[in-house]
Amino acid sequence: MAFIVFGTLGFLIIHLFDFVSLKRAPLLKPVTWLVGSGLLFYSIVMVCLMSERLPLPVWSIWLGWLLLLGSLILLIYSLFVNLPFIKTYVARGVGDRLVKTGLYALVRHPWVHCFTLLLLSLFLVSGSSLLLIAAPVWILMDIILVVIQDKFVFVRMFSGYEEYQQETPMLIPNQRSIAVFINQLRQDKTNNQKQRRLDKMSTLGELLRQGRTEEMWDRCCGFIDLSLEDFMRIQRRLLLEQLELLKKCELGQRIMNGARPESVEEFRELVPLTTYADYAPYLLKRRLGVLPEKPLTWMHTSGRSGEYPFKRVPLTSRQYREMGPAMLSSLIFSSCRGRGDIVLRKHDKYLYALAPTPYLSGVAGRRVDEEGLLDFLPTLDEGEKMEFTDSVKQGFKLALFEGMDVCGAIASLLVSMGERFSQGSGNIAIKPFLRKPKALLRLAKGYMKSKLARRPMLPKDVWSLKGVVAGGTDTTIFRDKIKEMWGRYPLNVYAFTEAVFIATQTWDYQGMTFLPHLNFLEFIPEEDSLKLREDPTHEPKTLLLDEVRAGENYELVITSFLGGTMVRYRNGDMVRITSLRNEQLNIDIPQMEFHSRVDDLIDIAGFTRLTERTIWQAIEHSGVACKDWTARKEVKEQQKLHIYLELKEDGYQREKEVTLAIHQQLKELDSDYANLESFLGLRALEVTLLPENAFQAYRLEQQAAGANLARLKVPHINPSDSMLDFLINSSRKVAVPDHRERRPASV
């Protein structure tokens, strides 16, 4: 009987393990589990060996051995495979996450059945008479402790456990749980088959050549068929994997302030929001030893003028590998007519008018080229040896000779290219085309179309494109103009260097669909984002994708997956959730569009990002007698930096003179701003002179309204419409004391 008591004591120690996990004791957790399991194992063995044997038929002994093998497999699987071993039994704190798959889809405590089957099989094998007494005692003890776990412990350990209790029975499977379990087995089989196919797959170009378009679609575009629940499951799984890498590296420990979150909820609660300033000391110096994973390459993007010339961001091999299908999904969507439709063909000609490496667009182009699907115009090697404008011109020249099937560029550049092509179409030299009959026919066809339409020749007259992919914040602005010039609407994608790729439109050209496997997505409600801008100490609560609301604006926060660097990173973009799903295409993922910038950067045409400091320096160095100013990006026929400026009392200058002086200084201070004029022919500055004392009148009006100190002044960057309306139209109505020096009257 002593062994039965020892076994019962072992059970009690094993279940004490849960309370040790909640207390986050680092060494006591595995010790408790090993001691309790060891004591129970010893008691079971001794009960089987030391007690009197009952006479059992031979067939029952053989049956016992079969059941023993099966019960051991199920017990090991339920405790050590279905559950993450290190997180559950070794690491400090509670388990990795709530597991609801595998045997845990049948019942919430499957090991009770496995343990019961184990004791039955041991009785058949050993014939132990004492086991007839010990087994019911231990099984009853197991059930009692499991009930305590279920009602009082697991609800504290795991987020969502109460919902799990409603979905899945405790010990006895029901019809629903059996159906869920079977469906999961089928899904696992399907996923394994897909993985084997992917492992054997070489490139997307090879898949297309072999006619395996279904596999190509699944690999690039299959994310649109995910349910929102599946999307979030992928997000949570990949975040927990990323957290393990972050905990082991210096950068992760610094960024997370030493926190070691064990769940998504802890991660969002304990880890602060970040900006590039938090990473600059490490990334600008390329400190490889501090990163979560060794980078394959480094990418650059525009920095903050006046602070650092560019941002440097590492890209891991795993991120680079996933970049190809992500980028190609937009090309497929831009050319397809529906789900599963692959219109692209191997060796289609691709005019790739985007910045070369080390920018994201250049690295992405390299990755797409590796898939062997498209022929770039010009080749990436040739293009990177030229200036950007020369590369675009060479691409157009090659497209005239060889044809063009798809095109990729930022939206403003597509418009600029279309306008320049139209203006120069009458000066195309015919002689080089005489040896190229197809090219001559293509040009002649375009000429005839333009003449019949009684207008200059446009790109759509020469090329019948399968798809146009555009990036940049102005894609929706130039949408109709691009359609008019190129014959197709541009498919909008949302990507930035730190995140690699976020979302893409599909073939209906409406909202963009998020990708689940490159970044963990969080959303700061607009009101909280504005509070954070006014008060940097404010700690906003974020929402996940399954918590956002249609019609609301949110600041985006990303955490890199696949060994990337960024953690709860704010890049300053505000997105708008246009709908919670795409009803027309049956996409069960919230749809988005780019809305605006939320920080003090003004992004013009995707070429330059100007800060308050740079604009202020340009005004100061221009010689303009400026009293105060405010500026924002505005879009009418094109994107512009619009400065609203009040001159000093002795400053008598015309708007045209002021505009030219500040424009010249901005070109000297920021090379990317200068490129707007040289690359796009875009004069991106407009200045409006405000009435005298306009800013002082605003302050007086705000004081009279009882506004707090932070609300008295018009911000230098991104003033609201109401603020500008007051400065331009209403400021004259406010009586402003004249503080100018009074001179004595002449005698």
Image (tube, rainbow, N blue to C red):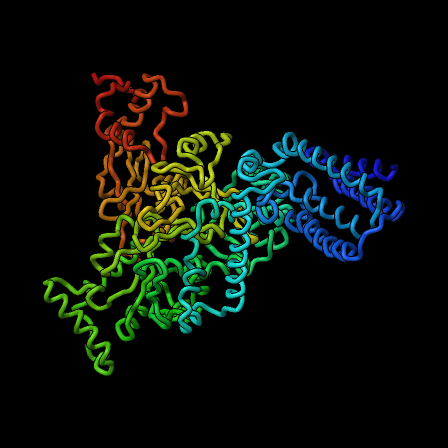
Report x, y in % for residue 554: 40, 38
Q: Residue furthest bottom?
A: 435
Residue 302 in sight from this viewpoint: no
Left or right: 63 as drawn, with respect to 193: right
Report x, y in % for residue 451: 11, 67
The front one of 370 and 8 is 8
Name the residue rendered at 60%, 36% in the picture: 158
Name the residue rendered at 36%, 32% in the picture: 715
Left or right: 206 as drawn, with respect to 177: left
Left or right: 193 as drawn, with respect to 529: right
Name the residue rendered at 41%, 61% in the picture: 217
Vertical placement of residue 89 versus 678, above or below? above
The front one of 532 and 659 is 532
Report x, y in % for residue 571: 45, 44
Vertical placement of residue 475 versus 434, above or below? above
Name the residue rendered at 20%, 80% in the picture: 431
The front one of 485 and 60 is 60
